[in-house]
Amino acid sequence: MSLIAGGSFPASIVPMPNQVAVQGNYINFQDIAGGFNQWAQQYLPELYEQEVERYGNRTLSGFLRMVGAEMPMTSDQVVWTEQNRLHVAYDNCSCAPSGAANSSTVTITITPGAGNPATSAIRDGNTILITDNATGLVSAKALVTNRLSAGTDGYTIDAILYETDSGAFPAALNATSTSIFVYGSEFPKGGNGMAGAIEPGVTTFTNSPIILKDNYELSGSDAAQIGWIEVATEDGTSGYLWYLKAESETRLRFEDYMEMSMVEGVLQAQPNLGAAPAATQFGANFGPAGANGLQIKGTQGLFQAIETRGNVFSGFAGAAAPGSGALADFDEILKNLDKQGAIEENMLFLSRQTALDFDDMLAATNGGYASTQSASYGLFDNEAEMALNFGFSGFRRGSYDFYKTDWKYLNDATTRGLSKEIDGVMIPAGTSTVYDQMLGSNIRRPFLHVRYRASETEDRRFKAWITGSVGGAYTTDLDTMRVNFLSERCLVTQAANNFVLFKGA
């Protein structure tokens, strides 16, 4: 007895009364021609449960955790004050003899702007050094005898030269581009004391937090069909996930966004986009009714802070042969550091090409160079092994120690790896002393740190909550599970004059 072929089955398929795999009841998984639908496929494909990690660790965050800290704040704005320089100096001044060419008296005009303050702190009786800006090789010393009142071109000062070249005023100083600084004072016997006083100045900086949001949604129907997948997550754990696999990746992506926003953030250049912004300026889903550009302030990230207040070096190593052009460039950076805070230990976070340029530079300088044996590793308790565990290698140049590492953010093909604009950044290690407006006292903070909004009842460092009617939440009648993410934060870049941003030529 045999079953009749046909009916509900194609002529080529003969069902068997028992579960026996024979040629007559074989279903070709790939062949769906002839109207034989996929739902009837009885031999399922072999399924690999384990996810293939073809991109390795995909997360980019961790940079700020390495170099800074996170601290709460309660206000819409963070304000900090930084010291100004201790000594009095002026650049781009004009200097000329007061009388004949061989006159020992000179007149110096200090023009506000171009780095000079609006008022002069030079007083009668100060001894000053005058030098040319063109070469810096010609100088003269003088005694200020009369600090005149302000004029249309700035502050004018009369001074007597202590010495001249063969009785003639140095021609290189008879120019509109000279620099001066105060190195002391001298008074005659029986004279009055120093007139006036120097009021120490401070510079105040501000930044504002931004609100970051993201979410993940899953319908109730999809949540009912559970499919397991084995994963190894970027935080070092592994195991099985079902539909929350996508939620996990959304969370990781949002954590990256929190750090990337602190690095890339910029201030809104046009806070006022018009007295009456157009009603369609922002979409209905962007914000509350009437939301417009007046509510968008932006925030100053690391790159903008360095470009605004720090040091920028373009074209490190240039197009020279490996190692040959980088050392001269690096020494120029060191000379500039000497003019700033001269912080001994610094960390270099570099793109792949710039890291290779540093390696070539060090190899060319010290043939059998072993980069991990050159620095003292004071930042890592003088333990080279600890530094290597963090991915740093160190070297010493001049009186500075440097610890360099690759910055994945600059190499990833979906972030700054798309652009050649930023080659790396140099960040001073340690802490700075600043005046905290909220505490009313001097405090020590890492040069680079994040402030997030928080109070006793609301912590907005990283918020995550579930809404909808799926997955245990019963807050709305929407047939979905919605996982919401939110953070409100900003970056504080203190003493940016000690930072260096490497940019492509």
Image (tube, rainbow, N blue to C red):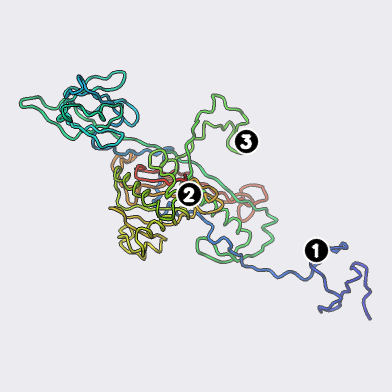
| First in sequence: mark 1 vs mark 3 | 1
- Asked if residue 475 can be seen in this view, the reply is yes
Q: Is residue 280 above or below residue 236?
A: above
Q: Are marks 1 and 3 in contact (CB under 8 Å)?
A: no
Residue at which label 3 appears: 283
Residue at 14% from the left image edge and 30% from the top image edge: 162
Q: Is residue 193 above or below residue 362?
A: above
Query: Marks 2/1: CA distance?
Result: 46 Å
Residue found at the far front of this picture: 166
Tell me the amino acid under the disc marked 3. Gly
- Asked if residue 455 can be seen in this view, the reply is no
| First in sequence: mark 2 vs mark 1 | 1
**Label disc, if present, on residue 38 of the rendered structure:** 1
Secondary element at image label 3: loop
| First in sequence: mark 3 vs mark 2 | 2
Q: Are marks 3 and 2 in contact (CB under 8 Å)?
A: no
Residue at which label 2 appears: 259
Percent position (x, y) of residue 3?
92, 76
Percent position (x, y) of residue 51?
61, 65
Rendered image quadrant of residue 173: top left
- Of residues 369 and 53, the one nearer the viewer is 369
For mark 3, does the 10 Å Cα neighbourhood hold few (<14), some (14 to 19), or many (20 or more) residues?
few
Tell me the amino acid under the disc marked 2. Glu
Query: Marks 1/3: CA distance?
Result: 43 Å
